[in-house]
Image (cartoon, rainbow, N blue to C red):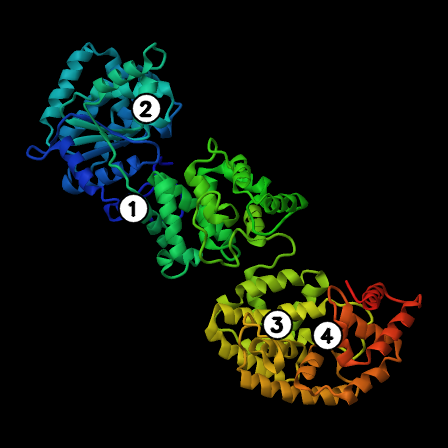
């Protein structure tokens, strides 16, 4: 595997640590550097190698392999007859015969040239003989040369019994190289990734051949690593290693500096290559939050092209698993943590309560409560310093955590996010999904919600019933709310018909135990308003949905929406609730409220209204419009002689978390009569637990 990363998406985007191969991929503008480097290796006038050894230096991942690839392509384009030898000692690391392997590669490259002259082939034979002197192990253990060049192995044997001295043989080789009419350039990559002894072996190899007039060398390495290996075992290791390196390399050139804007461009280019695969939004690079993240990463976190390549490779895998469940920009940030700060990921795993907006555990509740009690920024800062000590977390990683998790952003002096996706990682569901690399038990995937959104009414209702029976409807509704406005081409009216089928009370019997359906229907009804808040243009669609369900007599949802519209416009003396989204105008609301109140009155007087409801919302609207009158009160008073009516009405007034004021009850029925029935009912032993709790609340007149 190559050491350095690609600098622009290759034909296999998302794969980490692949250098670029062609000039068309050069987004860092290094071609000018490559052209000047080529001029130092080959004399333009004679078109022969200058016989120089050049070192290209830079830390791991800085793009050295990419430079060698660009250089090889440029040399073959500019000098078609050039012999360019690629030698990567890391690929054969651990073998005892690096020198023999190098000679073999040099000969193979020469003989692979279709236009190689007889002169070049003769040089190949001489090189084989020379290799037999400088790599005696190869003559005994490496017969592969014979398969590369006819007579190669024999040449090694000849070298073993030849009377020609090494000095004379070297002079002959130099004369032959001086006479050759093509440049020979050797590119040695990954020098800093092999063992110390192997680095010294390669150094000896270059020293043995570097002063040949027809061969130029380019070695790519991390200077500190090579100096360390060359000076190992000596008292003045660095000084000795550097002096040794200077004898081998005549010209040492550091890679051009990469600026933050270049890193940012490199990252965006990589993501552009993955755009279709990961369904990134069109124009993603223009999104304000993306630009903020890239600025943070390019200035404080990512240093080399390899960093970018590792990031995009990791993001490709992570986003491929979680793109539909977690905000993609947060996933990009999380991928940075995986590649650059694994200790931060372990911190997130071990203390999730410290970072998310929702509380996970009792310990998290205690910590969050303590923050509120302290009221001292200094103490909060002290806790965060313990959580994210400077010695373990560089400022860039601290800033990134602040970007992703607003709960710690103020202490980290990070800008708070100015928009909040429901899939943002600081929310409980996306965070757990990310840490698990999959949905937690009981959570619903985007795919399952999309199937629900496009299902026919009966099927949609059945999906909701199944979730309710499994105890996972709350999670389903949350995910539905997250995704609903993001999906185009939905038959909204059809969808809400299905939801209304589920929300409809299946019978007209008085409640005999507390049911959470009142809250569930409220949560479903609020989703429509949430859509309008997020996109005001959705109001027209919401109005169509309302009118359609009203005409279908789907009172469970319609009554809730109508009541909230009455409060939104402050009709009938109610205080205005501007937080409620507008579905109907004030005039429309008034007309619908009166129309429905008349229908509801008729149903109530025939005993077919309240038993068919989960709650008393229609009654409150009838009170507002003045259509709930004495005949309505007397009809309900008469029904209170039935214990089941007392239980059912009390569950609607006081069940669960609900509490109804005496004043309101007095408008619905005769309060004294109702209270007397409550007291009498409490004396019975045959009462369901949730009914007894509601009756006790009604008796006390308080929580």
Specify whether 75 is left or right of 284.
left
Image quadrant of residue 399?
A: top left
Instruction: Return the x and y of residue 92 as percentages of the image width and height.
Output: 37, 27
- Please give the name of the residue rendered at 23% of the width and 44% of the height, measured from the top-left corner: 29
Specify the quadrant that holds the C terminus: bottom right
Q: Which mark is residue 261?
A: 1
Q: Nearer the viewer, residue 476 or 292?
A: 292
Camera-near label (4 vs 1) is 4
Tell me whether circle 3 and circle 4 mark residues in contact (CB < 8 Å): no
Residue to which mark 4 is pinned: 615
For label 1, the SS is helix
Q: Which residue corresponds to the image point at 70% horizontal and 65% vertical from the top-left?
A: 468
Quadrant housing residue 566? bottom right
Is residue 647 in view from this perspective? Answer: yes
Image disc number at residue 398: none
Number of the label disc, if any, that sits on residue 224: 2
Q: Which residue is mark 3?
A: 525
Disc number lying in front (1 or 2): 1
């Amino acid at each position: 595997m190559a050491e350095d990363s690609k600098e622009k998406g290759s034909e296999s985007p998302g794969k980490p640590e692949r250098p670029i191969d062609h000039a068309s991929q050069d987004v860092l503008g290094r071609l000018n550097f490559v052209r000047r480097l080529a001029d130092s290796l080959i004399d333009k006038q004679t078109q022969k190698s200058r016989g120089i050894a050049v070192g290209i230096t830079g830390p791991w991942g800085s793009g050295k392999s990419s430079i060698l690839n660009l250089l090889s392509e440029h040399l073959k384009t500019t000098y078609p007859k050039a012999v360019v030898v690629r030698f990567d000692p890391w690929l054969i690391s651990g073998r005892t015969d690096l020198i023999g392997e190098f000679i073999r590669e040099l000969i193979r490259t020469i003989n692979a040239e279709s236009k190689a002259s007889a002169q070049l082939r003769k040089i190949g034979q001489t090189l084989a003989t020379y290799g037999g002197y400088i790599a005696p192990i190869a003559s005994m253990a490496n017969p592969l040369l014979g398969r590369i060049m006819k007579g190669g192995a024999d040449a090694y044997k000849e070298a073993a019994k030849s009377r020609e001295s090494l000095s004379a043989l070297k002079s002959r080789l130099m004369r032959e190289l001086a006479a050759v009419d093509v440049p020979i350039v050797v590119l040695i990559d990954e020098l800093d990734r092999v063992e110390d002894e192997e680095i010294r072996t390669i150094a000896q190899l270059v020293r043995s051949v570097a002063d040949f007039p027809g061969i130029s060398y380019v070695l790519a390495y991390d200077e500190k690593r090579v100096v360390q290996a060359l000076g190992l075992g000596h008292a003045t290791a660095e000084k000795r290693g550097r002096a040794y390196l200077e004898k081998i390399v005549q010209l040492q050139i550091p890679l051009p500096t990469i600026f933050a804007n270049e890193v940012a461009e490199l990252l965006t280019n990589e993501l552009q290559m993955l755009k279709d695969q990961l369904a990134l939004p069109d124009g993603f690079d223009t999104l304000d939050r993306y630009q903020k993240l890239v600025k943070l990463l390019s200035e404080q976190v990512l240093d080399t092209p390899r960093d970018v390549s590792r990031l995009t490779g990791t993001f490709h895998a992570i986003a491929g698993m979680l793109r539909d469940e977690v905000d993609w920009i947060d996933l990009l940030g999380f991928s940075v943590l995986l590649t650059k700060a694994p200790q931060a990921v372990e911190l997130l795993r071990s203390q999730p309560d410290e970072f998310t907006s929702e509380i996970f555990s009792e310990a998290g509740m205690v910590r969050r409560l303590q923050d509120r009690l302290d009221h001292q920024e200094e103490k909060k800062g002290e806790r965060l310093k313990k959580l994210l000590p400077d010695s373990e977390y560089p400022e860039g990683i601290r800033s990134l955590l602040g970007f992703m998790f607003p709960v710690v952003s103020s202490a980290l002096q990070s800008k708070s996010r100015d928009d909040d996706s429901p899939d943002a990682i600081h929310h409980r569901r996306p965070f757990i999904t990310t840490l698990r690399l999959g949905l937690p038990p009981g959570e619903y995937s985007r795919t399952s919600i999309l199937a629900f959104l496009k299902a026919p009414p009966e099927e949609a209702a059945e999906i909701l019933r199944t979730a309710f029976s499994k105890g996972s409807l709350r999670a389903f509704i949350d995910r539905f709310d997250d995704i609903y406005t993001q999906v185009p081409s939905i038959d909204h009216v059809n969808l809400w018909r299905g939801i209304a089928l589920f929300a409809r009370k299946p019978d007209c019997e008085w409640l005999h135990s507390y049911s959470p359906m009142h809250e569930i229907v409220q949560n479903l009804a609020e989703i429509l308003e949430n859509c309008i808040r997020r996109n005001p243009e959705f109001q027209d669609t919401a109005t169509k949905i309302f009118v359609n369900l009203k005409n279908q007599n789907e009172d469970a949802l319609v009554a809730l929406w109508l009541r909230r519209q009455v409060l939104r416009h402050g009709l009938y003396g109610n205080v205005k609730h501007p937080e409620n989204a507008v579905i109907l105008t004030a005039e429309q609301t008034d007309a619908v409220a009166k129309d429905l109140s008349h229908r509801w009155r008729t149903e109530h007087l025939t005993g077919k209204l309240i038993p068919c409801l989960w709650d008393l919302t229609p009654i409150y609207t009838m009170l507002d419009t003045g259509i709930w009158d004495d005949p309505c009160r007397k009809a309900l008073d008469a029904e209170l002689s039935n214990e089941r009516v007392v239980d059912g009405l009390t569950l609607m007034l006081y069940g669960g978390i609900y509490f109804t004021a005496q004043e309101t009850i007095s408008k619905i029925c005769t309060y004294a009569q109702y209270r007397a029935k409550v007291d009498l009912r409490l004396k019975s032993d045959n009462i369901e637990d949730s009914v007894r709790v509601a009756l006790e609340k009604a008796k006390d007149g308080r929580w």
